[in-house]
Image (tube, helix red, strand yellow):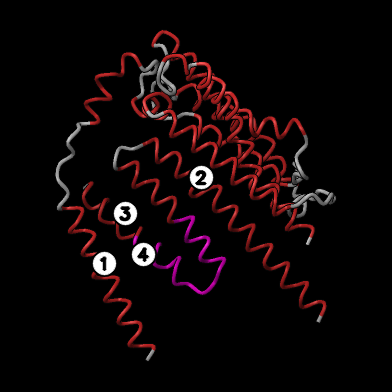
Amino acid sequence: MREAVRIAVLLGGGALAVGLIAAVLDLPPPAVDLPEAVAAHMAQSGVEHPVTAVLLNFRGYDTLLEVAVLLLALLGVLTVVGNEAGTPGTAGAPDPVLQTLARLATPLMMLAAGYLLWAGAHRPGGAFQAGAILAAAAVLLNLAGVLPAWAVPRFWLRLGMAGGLLIFLAIAAGLLGQGALLRYPPEWAGTLILIIEAGLALSLGLILAGLFLLLGERGERR
Amino acid sequence: MSLAFDLLLAGALLWSAWRALATPDLTRAVVLFIVFGLLMTLAWARLSAPDIALAEAAIGAGLTGALLLDAIGALRRGEDERDDRS
């Protein structure tokens, strides 16, 4: 019986894979040449890197909603962690070599995050990558026993986590008079994108670190 | 030369994905998942998509791997406590 089920699953999975590949190969060529359209409007995007231009300018509202989704995920974690006040613990026993390494690596990681944020305007990089590196630095410090896990966040931490989205929303609301959502005036686009990205990098760093550090505390307490 | 590298990379991707799903040992599965994420980073870099490669390395391999390892640790602690009580 189990053998029959296994063979049926294998056959079904194989058929699905073949069907999907055939469907993808059968797709008609796209009617709109998107890379061409992006290249044609690069001059008014305010940045020089096409990926950043698409993420923060041409399809800025996608990024806006993505950040909102991440914030929602963090709210989900907060409801799991609950409001109980526990003693924040650190993961693992302190190890002097690891602690020194983490202390040495953290400034470099912050430097790398700042570089990625700045580089996003003209080469691969940007707010998400910078935020991920900031979060990784926080996780490293926590694992090395330098940074205690977070208890339920207080006002400033909450503000930091929501700040990126709030800045993004404020700029989006301020630009509503332009007639379309998130259409930047070309002469201001570069500055606005940099402001949004700086806020996003900090908030994403805190959110991603929070996903780890808030849950870490709960694991320690059980 | 680069074709051989690409074929090797694709094979290693499929192999690590399969092993990560099929291995019964959770710790090994997580380590294989991290390996898969790093290989995926290489694949994105080979496809000249450095933006996605950066995100994959930082979030896919790094943060997700750390979260999964932490989850295994929490599961182990839970099991230990249950053993202590019985």
Residue sitting at x 60%, y 27%: A166
Say if labels 1 and 4 share a chain.
Answer: no
Mark 2 and mark 1 in contact? Answer it, CB < 8 Å.
no
Residue B15 within the magenta-colored segment of the rendering: yes
Q: Tell me the amino acid under the disc marked 3.
A: Leu
Mark with earlier residue (2, 3): 3
Residue A52 within the magenta-colored segment of the rendering: no
Residue sitting at x 31%, y 18%: A42
Residue A40, x across and y down, in percent: 24, 19
Residue A205, x across and y down, in percent: 60, 36
Q: To which residue does mark 4 refer?
A: B15
Q: To which residue does mark 3 refer?
A: B9
Task: Report the span colored magenta.
Answer: B14-35
Mark with earlier residue (3, 4): 3
Q: Residues within 10 Å of mark 4 (few under 14, many from 20)?
A: few
What is the CA distance from the residue labelled 2 to the residue labelled 4?
A: 21 Å
Q: To which residue does mark 2 refer?
A: B59
Q: Tell me the amino acid under the disc marked 2.
A: Ile
Residue A213 falls left or right of residue A131: right
What is the CA distance from the residue labelled 3 to the residue labelled 4?
A: 10 Å
Viewer-proximal residue, A16 or B30? A16
Mark 2 and mark 3 in contact? Answer it, CB < 8 Å.
no
